[in-house]
Amino acid sequence: MPDAPAHLGKEGEAFWTALATDSLSPAQEYLLCLAAEQVDLQERCRKRIARLGPTLTTKTGVVKARPELAIERGAARLIQSLIRQLDLGPEREHKNRGRVVRHSDRIARERR
């Protein structure tokens, strides 16, 4: 199994270790590294939000969401996308299900 890149934090390294296999191609290793970096970023944001709270008050007194919330959410989406591209996560069981068909579309098709 390939070693985790040295620059990864604790959470990113654990993520790498959980998904890395000997059969990863260089492209998959790269995608896995990107995902592990996002795991580290997500964790840093979570810790900062836990310490400072989910909102901040501007100089003019307006209460706003912390930027870390958007960064954490973006990291989560990117991790999910990268896992899907790697075809290593639990989504692989569902990849051949096809597109979702709405009930009204199904009825229209059956009437033809």
Image (tube, rainbow, N blue to C red):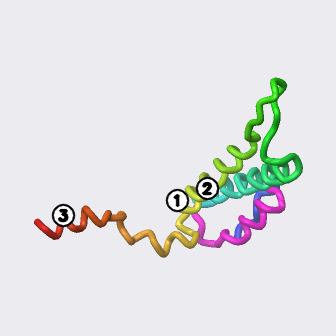
Let me know if residue 107 is in the magenta part.
Answer: no
> Which residue corresponds to the image point at 68% horizontal and 56% vertical from the top-left?
33
Q: Secondary structure at mark 2?
A: helix
User: Can you tell which of label 2 and label 3 is closer to the viewer?
Assistant: 3
In the displayed structure image, the side of residue 17 where residue 81 appears, left or right: left
What whole-number distance in Å separates the C-alpha atoms at marks 2 and 1?
8 Å
**Residue nearest the observer in this picture, 72 or 84:** 72
Are discs 2 and 1 less than 8 Å apart at CB? yes
**Residue nearest the observer in this picture, 12 or 56:** 56
In the displayed structure image, the side of residue 16 where residue 95 appears, left or right: left
Mark nearer the N terminus (2 vs 1): 2
User: Can you tell which of label 3 and label 1 is closer to the viewer?
Assistant: 3
> Which residue corresponds to the image point at 76% horizontal and 41% vertical from the top-left?
66
- Region in magenta: 8-25
Task: Estimate the x, y position of residue 91 in percent, counting from the top left.
Answer: 52, 69
In the displayed structure image, the side of residue 20 where residue 43 appears, left or right: right
Looking at the picture, which amino acid does disc 2 mark?
Leu
Task: Estimate the x, y position of residue 46 in percent, counting from the top left.
Answer: 79, 53
> Which residue corresponds to the image point at 48% horizontal and 75% vertical from the top-left?
93
Mark nearer the N terminus (2 vs 3): 2
Q: Secondary structure at mark 3?
A: helix
Write down the residue under mark 1. Answer: 85
Which quadrant holds the N terminus? bottom right
Write down the residue under mark 3. Answer: 108
Residue lying furthest right: 51
Looking at the picture, which amino acid does disc 1 mark?
Gln
Which quadrant holds the C terminus? bottom left
